[in-house]
Amino acid sequence: MEVTIAQTEEEMKGVQHVRYEVFVKEQHVSVEEEWDEYEDSSIHFLAHDNHTPVGAGRLRWVENTGKAERICILSSYRGTGLGRLIMSALEDYVQSQNGKEVILSAQTHARPFYEKIGYKVTSEEEFLDAGIPHVSMIKGIE
């Protein structure tokens, strides 16, 4: 399995496919909420297994801070370490651009995963995004 930055139209179709499968079909997020005004200005990461798209993530900058968004993995690939690979690629990119931290809004069921890889909760209370409970998290990148 490999994670790369999506640069071609074909790779972006792979990102869209994974996000559609996970967020729209599995989690019932509306298409209108899933695709937003940040798509064109974000950096998209694509995880693939023998050229088959199996995971995705998005990075955008909020001032000098990298914000990880839309991190998702097809259900058949969860628990394989792919989430760590995607986050590592994203964090490495942030560091290469002199970013000092990564923030994200984690679905509450994914909170333990993000805590295992060094993220700390910064929100006092859970909040809803697309009808799904989330918490805000941060990790310093050295």
Image: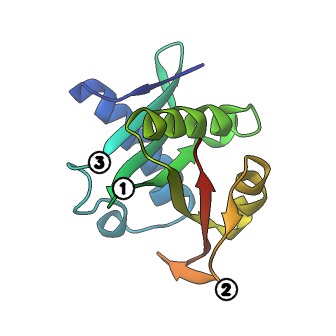
Of the residues shown, which amino acid type is indicated by label 3?
Answer: Ser
**Which residue is identified by label 1?**
64
**Which residue is identified by label 2?**
124
Residue furthest to the top in view is: 50
Q: Check disc 1 and report its element: helix, strand or loop.
A: loop
Residue 90: tell me if it is visible: yes
Sequence-wise first label, 3 or 2:
3
Give residue 69's position: percent from left, percent from top. 46, 55
Count neighbours of disc 2 (C-alpha within 10 A) and say few if under 14, some if 14 to 19, many if 20 or more: few
Disc 1 to disc 3, C-alpha distance: 14 Å
Count neighbours of disc 3 (C-alpha within 10 A) and say few if under 14, some if 14 to 19, many if 20 or more: some
Sequence-wise first label, 1 or 3:
3
Eyeballing the image, is 117 above or below 2?
A: below
Q: Nearer the viewer, mark 3 or mark 2?
A: 2
Disc 2 to disc 1, C-alpha distance: 23 Å
Give residue 141's position: percent from left, percent from top. 58, 45
Q: Check disc 2 and report its element: helix, strand or loop.
A: loop
Of the residues shown, which amino acid type is indicated by label 2?
Answer: Glu
**Which residue is identified by label 3?**
42
Q: Quadrant of the C terminus?
A: top right
